Amino acid sequence: MRAFSYERAASPADAAARAAEVPGAKFIAGGTNLLDLMKHEIETPLHLIDVRGTGLNDITATEEGGLRVGAMVSNSTLAANPRVREAYGVLSRALVAGASGQLRNKATTGGNLLQRTRCPYFYDTAMPCNKRSPGAGCAALGKGATTRQLGVIGTSDACIATHPSDMAVALQALDARVETVTPEGETRSLTLDAFYQLPGDTPDVENTLAKGEMITGVVLPAPVEGRHAYFKVRDRSSYAFALVSVALIHAPDGTGRVALGGMAPRPWRRDAADAALPQGAAAVMAELLDGARPTEENAYKLTLAERTLAALLAEE
Amino acid sequence: MDFNQSTDDNLFDHARIVGKPHARIDGALKVTGQAPYAYERHDVAAHQLVGYPLCATIAKGRITHMDATAARAAPGVAAVVTTLDIEPLAQAKSNVARLFGGDTVAHYHQAIAVVVADTLEQARSAAALIEVRYQEEQGVFDLDAAWEQQTPDEPLSDVGDVDAAFKNAAVTLDEVYRTASQSHAMMEPHASIVDWSDGGQMTVWTSNQMIAWTRKALAKTFAIDLETIRLESPYVGGGFGGKLWLRADTVLAALGSRAAGRPVKLALPRPLVFNNATHRSGTVQRLRIAADAEGRITAFDHSAFSHTLPGGSGENPVNQTRAFYAGASRRVAHTAIEMDLPESADMRAPGEASGLAALEIAMDEMAEKLGMDPVEFRILNDTQVDPEDPNKPFSDRHYVECLQKGAADFGWEARNRTPGGQREGQWLIGQGMAGAYRGAPTMDSGARVRLQAGRLVVETDMTDIGTGSYTIIAQTAAEAMGLALEDVEVRLGNSDYPVSSGSGGQFGAASATAGVYAACLKLQEEIAQRLGMNSPRFEQGMVIAGTTEVALAEVADGEELVAEDTIHFGDFKDTLQIGTFAAHFVEVAVHAHTGETRVRRMLAVCDAGRILNPVTARSQVIGGMTMGVGAALMEGLIPDVERGFFVNHDLASYEVAVHADIPEQEVIFLDTTDAASTPLKAKGVGELGICGVAAAVANAIYNATGIRVRDYPITLDRLIDQLPKVS
């Protein structure tokens, strides 16, 4: 771990302004991912701005009938919120499928969106990684590499890592928007597709946040009617990252939305795939996974994603 | 005390304390955080510094350049020792790769420097400042590619006429099975505090299973006098064979201490447990079985391959095949292929766990080919003699009773017999079973007992690696001396104490308790002599002969009485096969859509001689069963076969079973004793518990799905293409 300085910010605007001003600054909230990355020197911030005291701890109703979730709301609190459990079941289920109880108590809504990939080569600083060291190359694309956990779509020749969040997959299905404040005091509201950036030639850039820009919260639109389900498939029963996860919101008329985790560098959803939902899992995946570029080791994920959605649809 | 023949009826056949359930006597210390583990022993030496290792980032080659200037100048740094600073250290027999010194890199994450600083953060940060340049060499890292080109070694045994048996057989099987490399993944990483400040006396507080071996290894490695080394390891947070040997934590802390002139503590960061320390080698095993039409096995042919660094022995999985089942002909061979992956060595049931993982699937497949129940097939092929040497009987073998009792208690008869034929909602349900056989070796073991005003202190360098040694030793001493359990204090894991068996190879419990018994008998003799009594009885704190009774508290007039002895096990044991046996039954649910396997219930029935303490023995067996589920379903070190290292080197990516994976486990111990094993008629259970479990899970998956997977771990991607179609 490199030596760093530390301060506490009192408001989101202050935090953003300071982050733009101090070289090498980074926000820290729950620290459940960042501290590990700092110990391994995968992240080497010179300055940490602790944003837990910025007053973003509430879940409040919006005028549109939705919810605004403060960026500092813990994953445990969000999952247990009665309104979330009742009207946004897919989110509650996705949250409790992630990490462990202790981690969910510390991890925040904003931090969860920004967690880094679990690609094992990203975690070993002796290995070339374009995400960690731009231009270094990608060990995961090497001849003898193991890729069983890695991405099959939305990836690039520079990086095949996935985004590890469960929460973000549910938010994607819910059409949630990410709210931010810039160092200039401007606010922005972004869809997840606008927030997350696919790797292309610059896998080190994972989102469209500007320097210093801080997530202040997530806005859930008014609830969508229908059955909410989240199916996380993994090698053990708990405390493991998804091989594949499926978020499903299924209306009584057969229409609905599908988002996937464990497959891509961001939670993966396409309108055309949603439109195919009345035709069943195979039709959805034909749209959703069109253009997939799996490796020999992770091609099973294509089959698995379809069968997992089929399992959810068959439960009804 | 010499143990030169099977024991007669003795006090343990009428025991008050041995064989009874007692909670761990060290339990309260552990759950209140007061048991001193190596890395937290702040009190044992003042002014401790912290060491942090730097490790090689190539798999094979040479270091051409190291520059530690920046590290030495970094804040808080007291010393840096690089591998180029010293001559190659000598290698103890137990170390296949050199632990430190010189420019050769034999495997990924081999230690190449240690940085000593005031704090962990300073040491870690400074270690990252050391510049290293390498000359890389091509290595061999792919076992699956290597074995096909490898000429097998000569058979370890070749009995009868295997080729004729296969030619004449009514039913034969010929399949290839693969087990994955596995990590011990113990909770407590390798950790040591070493005080070698003046380069003279070396004191080591560590986490190690074998005090005497490791002390000897230190003497050899540093070319110093054994007498200058003291070693303590009173508590070990899991070892599973990974802490049988001297490892880099101790070596680096010692070098750091000598360089800094202060005591140094060092724990291996978690990734180093996987690539710096040892692991169980993966295996490729070709197994052939021949049987007659009635299901009697006529031949086994088992040829296995594992990997090792040059000079090591790999993972030999064929020995159980030599003696588990009847059959006149058998040939077994093991070839340890020299490769350049990190060092493979012993892990819980080394060889046995991997061999039975293959053999017991093969037995299931043979039963199916023969149209026989797998339990009946195993019963039919039981043997009471060593099939390679029919003059050598098993001392005490109740495998058939394990099978019968297990089948009855598990409800085996009621199971579904059609693979893939039992469904609950989206889950396919299946039942499977497997047998287990693990030898019951014993090792000479010493102890000292001190009678202090009616209380007894036991001292032995035996270790408790979470197994319950403290408790069973206290039980043994209390039984022998006629004391209450509370009147015995047990001190373990210290090189000042008599040399014991140590913990490994499931020999610890049987051997160490026998050694303590021997020391107690010595003390009894001394007391009898002192009191002028002839063969007194020791009961309820009293020494009794005829009508004379003297309280133990008063036999020494306030002095301390000390006795020491070692049990020596005689070679009469070589005329017998002494083993432990079990039958495992497992029910699994496999998700019909996703292929996820979840264990629903497990039962083990064990025949392991006298069970010294049913509580701690059960804990050992269910721990083994849990590890067996890991081996079956998720545990596997994944090599990058070009770069030459295990990629999943943390506990997020090397998955072991969690609580939610293990819903229900039951263990039944048969009421057996083995008079040929020890005076207590006891054998080990710690490795028996893992043996056969993986195959029982695999067989249950076959029963659930009709899919036969012969490669471990059985992750869903090995099933998904053969699962029932979904719409």
Image (cartoon, rainbow, N blue to C red):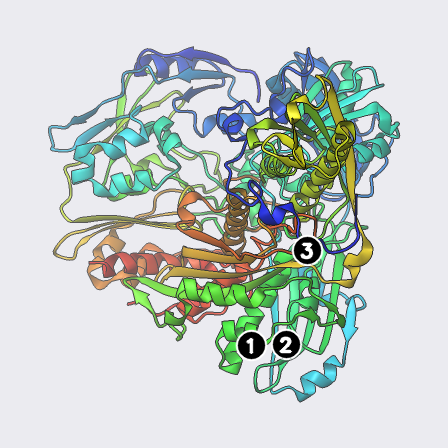
Image coordinates for residue A283, horizontal then vertical, percent? 28, 62
Would residue A303 be visible to someone looking at this image? no
Dot 3 alpha-carbon crowd within 10 angstroms: few under 14, some 14 to 19, many 20 or more = some
Corner quadrant of residue B157: bottom right
Among numbered discs 1 and 3, the one appearing first in the sequence = 1
Q: Secondary structure at mark 3?
A: loop
Question: Which quarter of the rendered picture does the N terminus of chain B lie within?
Answer: top right
* Residue picked out by circle 1: B366
Labels 1, 3: one chain = yes
What numbered label is drawn on residue B289? 2
Assess whether mark 2 and mark 1 are in contact (beta carbons under 8 angstroms): yes
Would residue B14 be visible to someone looking at this image? yes
CA gap, disc 1 and disc 3: 35 Å
Q: Chain of mark 2?
A: B
Is residue B379 left or right of B666 when viewed as pictured? right
In front: mark 1 or mark 3? 3
Question: Which quarter of the rendered picture does the C terminus of chain B lie within?
Answer: bottom left
Image coordinates for residue B423, horizontal then vertical, percent? 31, 67
| Amino acid bearing label 3 | Ala
CA gap, disc 1 and disc 2: 8 Å
